[in-house]
Image (cartoon, rainbow, N blue to C red):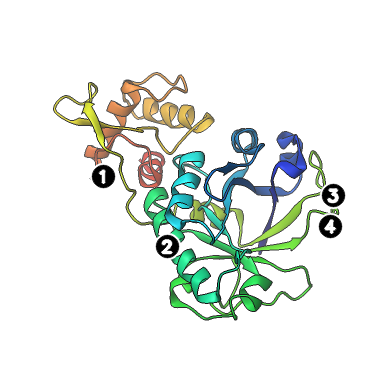
């Protein structure tokens, strides 16, 4: 079973994501950043509207091995922000050597992935294809084998690069034409498949990951006396999902207004629920807390 999606950047201009969502497209990747300072001109708009249209969303960084890996990972993380409900793992788009050797590029990619996974708290997906087979000598590396592959290959039977045995996502058309099917609401764009069902796509959004690197404490947290406030405290759930979670909590008997705003009242109710159910009482509606809320 496969699930259809697309990937876009500023080259597609303004997109009617609600029209896109009326098709059989279920997910979209948007270009977020490039190098150490570049930000795609349409990312902020795309990122918010993909979510509002009810699609799964993912962000990717176009990597440049000629510049510091950790700086680029930090730039990527700062632009995208915390990942949450129905957000796919972050992506490293690896298709440039910047004049470096295969070994140097691979070392750079390992450093980028390691830093990005620490910052995002999620495993990184690797986007590559012919570049890996040719410029990187089709190396079979266990470090990359542990990460999902987003394969770029425009042929009926795609060839998977050396470090992987199969693809998780497959970009099967380029954005220079409509591909097999035109997508309403968007100019010609790259089209993709996810190897799995929508339910499995949802599981990928909720997968286990390394611990998130926390920013410094910023003083006492008024909502939790005796504790330190750490910024940001934005929950992984966002938009309509906040209200949905609040409505469920109200139905469970918690004193909470389902107003769609995740403020001190929601955080306190969340922490109380987490304590009652053996979860870490951090006041954040992460994947485990979300699942426990709707299972209760």
The residue at 40%/41% (across/down) is: 290
- Foreground mark, 1 or 4? 4
Residue 279's tag is 1
Q: Quadrant of the C terminus?
A: top left
C-alpha span from label 4 to label 3: 7 Å
Q: Nearer the viewer, mark 3 or mark 1?
A: 3
- Quickly name the residue at label 2: 111
Q: Position of residue 48 (x, y in %)?
A: 59, 33
Q: Residue at x 46, y 42 (%)?
A: 84
The residue to which callout 4 is attached is 179
First in sequence: mark 1 or mark 4? 4
The alpha-carbon separation of the residues under discs 2 and 1 comes to: 32 Å
Mark sitting earlier along the chain (3/1) = 3
Q: CA distance from mark 1 to mark 4?
A: 46 Å
Q: CA distance from mark 2 to mark 3?
A: 38 Å
Q: Which residue is mark 3?
A: 182
Q: Is residue 232 above or below residue 163?
A: above
Considering every residue shown, the one lying at the far left of the view is 226
Q: Alpha-carbon neighbours of circle 3 within 10 Å: few (<14), some, or many (≥20)?
A: some
Q: Is residue 126 visible?
A: yes
């Amino acid at each position: 079973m496969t699930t259809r999606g697309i990937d876009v950047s500023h080259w597609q201009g303004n997109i009617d994501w609600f029209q896109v969502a009326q098709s059989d497209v279920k997910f979209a990747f948007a270009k977020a950043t490039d190098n150490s300072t570049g930000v795609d001109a349409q990312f902020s708009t795309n990122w918010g509207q993909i979510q509002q249209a009810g699609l799964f969303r993912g962000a990717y960084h176009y990597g440049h091995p000629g510049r510091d890996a950790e700086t680029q990972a930090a730039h990527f993380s700062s632009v995208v922000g915390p990942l949450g409900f129905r957000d796919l793992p972050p992506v490293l788009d690896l298709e440039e050597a910047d004049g470096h050797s295969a070994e140097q590029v691979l070392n750079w990619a390992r450093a980028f992935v390691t830093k990005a996974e620490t910052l995002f708290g999620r495993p990184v997906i690797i986007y590559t294809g012919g570049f890996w087979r040719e410029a990187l000598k089709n190396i079979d590396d266990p470090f990359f084998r542990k990460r999902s592959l987003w394969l770029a290959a425009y042929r009926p039977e795609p060839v998977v690069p050396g470090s992987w045995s199969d693809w998780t996502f497959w970009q099967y058309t380029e954005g220079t034409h409509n591909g097999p099917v035109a997508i309403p609401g968007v100019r010609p764009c790259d089209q993709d498949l996810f190897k799995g069902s929508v339910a499995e796509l949802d599981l990928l959004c909720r997968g286990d990951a390394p611990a998130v690197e926390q920013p410094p404490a910023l003083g006492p947290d008024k909502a939790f006396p005796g504790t330190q406030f750490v910024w940001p405290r934005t929950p992984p759930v966002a938009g309509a999902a906040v209200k949905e979670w609040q409505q469920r909590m109200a139905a469970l008997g918690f004193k909470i207004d389902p107003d769609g705003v995740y403020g001190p009242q929601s955080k306190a109710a969340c922490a109380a629920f987490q304590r009652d159910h053996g979860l870490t009482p951090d006041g954040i509606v992460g994947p485990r807390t979300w699942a426990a809320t709707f299972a209760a």
